[in-house]
Image (spheres, helix red, strand yellow):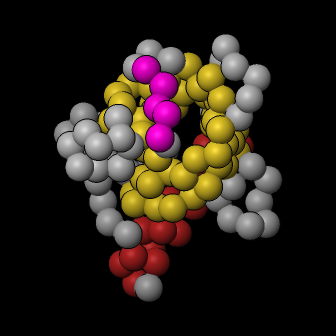
Amino acid sequence: MGFEDTSQRQSPRLHTRLFGVFRRDIDIDETEVMMLNLSVGGAFIRTEEPCPPGSTITLRFYLDESSVPLSVTGEVVWLRRPGQNGGDPGMGVKFHVITDDAQRQLREYLARMVEDDLFG
């Protein structure tokens, strides 16, 4: 785990490996994805087929095996196509709609990650 560059972000992102699904608002099918970093304000979602910037997506993911999935709506703010810049393909998503309870769970999860990294 480690911290991600925060030059364009309001909240630092932490490296993670969380599985989830997303779908664009115009689609009915969901796509399985892995989130490689996460913050209270957004995530990087690894996918071979990223959505174009400006797309609205709904993302559902589990913070741990026993939890109910969190559901957030966000906007794709950037993408990296397969083979581009040597990094994982995917998209950066900024969260726009998240319930108070989901935000609380997310903050608690991220706090545990930081605590484990510092004192683990």
Frontmost residue, 93 versus 85: 85
Question: In the rendered image, which quarter contains the C terminus?
Answer: bottom left
Q: Is residue 62 left or right of residue 44?
A: right
Give the number of marks.
0
Q: x and y percent of residue 118 in the render? A: 36, 78
- In magenta, the rendered stretch is 48-52
Q: Residue at point 46% right, 46% down? A: 46
Q: On the rendered structure, is 20 left or right of 85?
A: right
Q: In the drawing, does residue 23 fall left or right of residue 50?
A: right
Question: Which quarter of the figure is the N terminus placed in?
Answer: bottom left
Q: Position of residue 11 (x, y in %)?
A: 36, 43
Which of the pair 42/32 is nearer the observer? Answer: 32
Q: Residue furthest front?
A: 83
Residue 39: give x, y in percent of width and height.
45, 48
Q: Please provide percent x and percent y for residue 84.
A: 25, 39
Whether residue 111 is visible here, answered yes or no, is no
Residue lying at 64% horizontally and 45% vertically, measured from the top left:
32
In magenta segment, residue 53: no
Q: Residue at coordinates 66% horizontally, 29% vertically from top-left? A: 23
**Figure check: 72 above or below 64:** above
**Looking at the magenta stretch, what is its main secondary structure?**
loop
Residue at point 69%, 19% (across, down): 27
Q: Which of these two is toward me, 102 or 20?
A: 20
Task: From the viewer's perspective, tell me whether residue 24 is left or right of residue 17.
Answer: right
* Residue 51 sits inside the magenta stretch: yes
